[in-house]
Image (cartoon, helix red, strand yellow):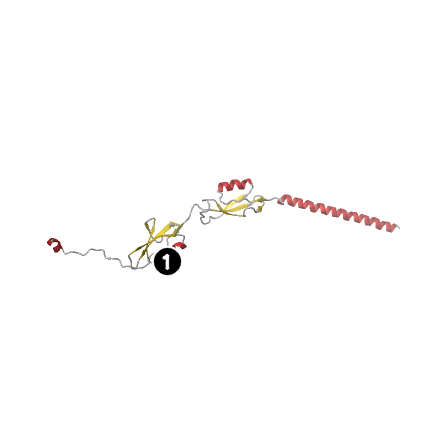
Amino acid sequence: MAFKEFIKKSGRILLWQLALAMVALVVIVWGALQLLNFYTDHGKFIVVPNLAKKSLTEVQMLLEEQNLRWEVLDSTEYNPKYPPLAVISQSPEPNERVKENRKIYLNINPKGYHKVTVPKVIQVTRRSAEATLQSVGLTIGTITYVDDIGKDMVLELLYDGKPVQPGDKLIKTSRIDLVCGNGLEIRDTIPTEIPIEELIGQ
């Protein structure tokens, strides 16, 4: 009987110890999760605002209010649909959820189009010249034909009525006028010489 009572008593103690160990484990896990949440702000986030077309002054005020940082990346190509020096794109994107103090990367619209180099298109066909000029961002204006045996050959480039040479710098999208040959020979405009004797005789 004494042995049976000992076994029952030992079993009860063992069960209590197991129960206490389980409770202690639950408390430790719960405490660890709370501590982790405290350090990581689990469940707390900030919705990234839409910064498109905003100036850097507006960006700074808006992001500082939400405890976010920002950094400007290299400027992209000028986009006439956006104001100069305004935000064109951002990363993370608008409405994304981020942690406090997250850095937002911005692409800013330049002040205007950059300059491009006028390519060598003199003495090439009009069609080829047009394609080459457009490939660097220049636009084609009026096309004027003059007497020259080189039919449809580009003889001269004009910008605002003034001659332009290959290698010159012009703002992208500048309008270039072409002077081309019409395939006709240049007419001799030098007057025929009259002997002086004839002039005296007159």
Give percent across and percent down for residue 190: 21, 55
84, 99: nearer the viewer:
84
Tell me where residue 157 appears, x and y as whole percent. 33, 53
Q: In which quadrant of the rendered view does residue 84 lie?
A: top left
Q: Mark 1 points at which residue?
A: 127
Q: Which residue lies furthest to the left in this view?
A: 201
The residue under the point 86% across, 51% down is 4
Q: How many neighbours does mark 1 have within 10 angstroms: few (below 14), some (14-19), or many (20 or more)?
A: few
Asked whether, in this view, residue 156 is left or right of residue 110, the answer is left
- Judged left or right of residue 4, residue 143 is left
Percent position (x, y) of residue 3?
Answer: 87, 51
Q: Is residue 60 left or right of residue 24?
A: left
Secondary structure beneath disc 1? helix
Q: Which residue is drawn at 64% across and 45% down?
A: 37
Q: What residue type is labelled 1?
A: Arg
At x 51%, y 41%, the residue is: 60
Residue drawn at (70%, 46%), measured in percent from left and top? 28
Q: How many labels does the image show?
A: 1
Q: Where is residue 193 in the image (x, y as percent from the top left)?
A: 17, 56
In the displayed structure, 160 sits above or below 126; it is above
The answer to whether 27 appears left or right of 160 in the picture is right
From the viewer's side, name the closer residue of 127 and 56: 127
